[in-house]
Image: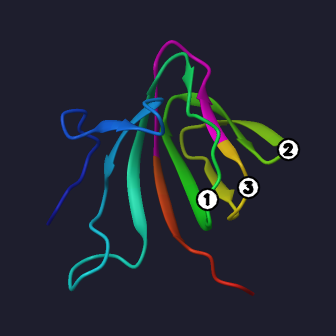
Amino acid sequence: MIIRRYDDRAAEPAHAGTIRAHEVLPFGGALGTPFHSAWGYLPGPGALEPHAHAHDEIYIVFAGRGKVTVGDESAEVGNGDIVEIPSGLAHNIENLTQGELKWLAFWWDHQPA
């Protein structure tokens, strides 16, 4: 059995230093996944830099409370919420509290319908 948890000692600054992140599961290879993954950590208050990329992505919030913006839409999110982010749309997440905001991000190459 392997148990994985966010570990700030393993995390590094990401997205121009606006968050701390580290890989959740290894990508590719014989034992790797077919998708990329990362823990996201944001002390409050603060925000991930807005960005867009050419892959689909989901965020799974598991600690804290924040606001996610995807394109022109914004919504508050908290523990247990899952956010779908289509490729090409600018997005960010913002910590609305003094506490920690933690989420899992999973992304993969865009698959045309």
- Residue 7 in the image: x percent, y percent? 23, 38
Instruction: Let me know if residue 65 is in the magenta part.
Output: no
Structural distance between the alpha carbons of marks 2 and 1: 16 Å
Question: Helix or strand or loop: what does disc 1 sit on?
Answer: loop
Q: Position of residue 73 (x, y in %)?
A: 83, 43
Residue found at the far left of this picture:
1
Boundaries of the magenta span: 92-103
State left or right for residue 42 relative to residue 77.
left
**Is the residue 80 above or below the residue 101 in the image?**
below
Q: Which residue is mark 3?
A: 89
- Which residue is situated farthest in the front direction here? 16
- Kindly check if marks 2 and 1 are in contact, taking CB atoms under 8 A apart as contact: no
* Amino acid, disc 2: Asp
Q: Which mark is residue 72?
A: 2
The colour scheme used here is rainbow
Q: Amino acid at mark 1?
A: His
Q: Nearer the viewer, residue 14 or 79?
A: 14
Number of other residues with Cα within 10 Å of mark 1, as a class: few under 14, some 14 to 19, many 20 or more:
few
Q: Residue at the spot x=24%, y=82% of the render?
A: 29
| Helix, strand or loop for the magenta stretch, by majority | strand
Q: Earlier in the sequence, mark 1 or mark 3?
A: 1
Residue of label 1 = 53
The residue shown at (67%, 59%) is: 84
Locate the N terminus by quadrant.
Answer: bottom left
Mark closer to the chain start, 2 or 3? 2
Can you tell which quarter of the image residue 41 is in? top left
Q: Quick check: 73 left or right of 66?
A: right
* Within-10-Å neighbours for mark 3: few <14, some 14–19, many 20+: some
Q: Tell me residue 32's x, y (percent).
A: 27, 76
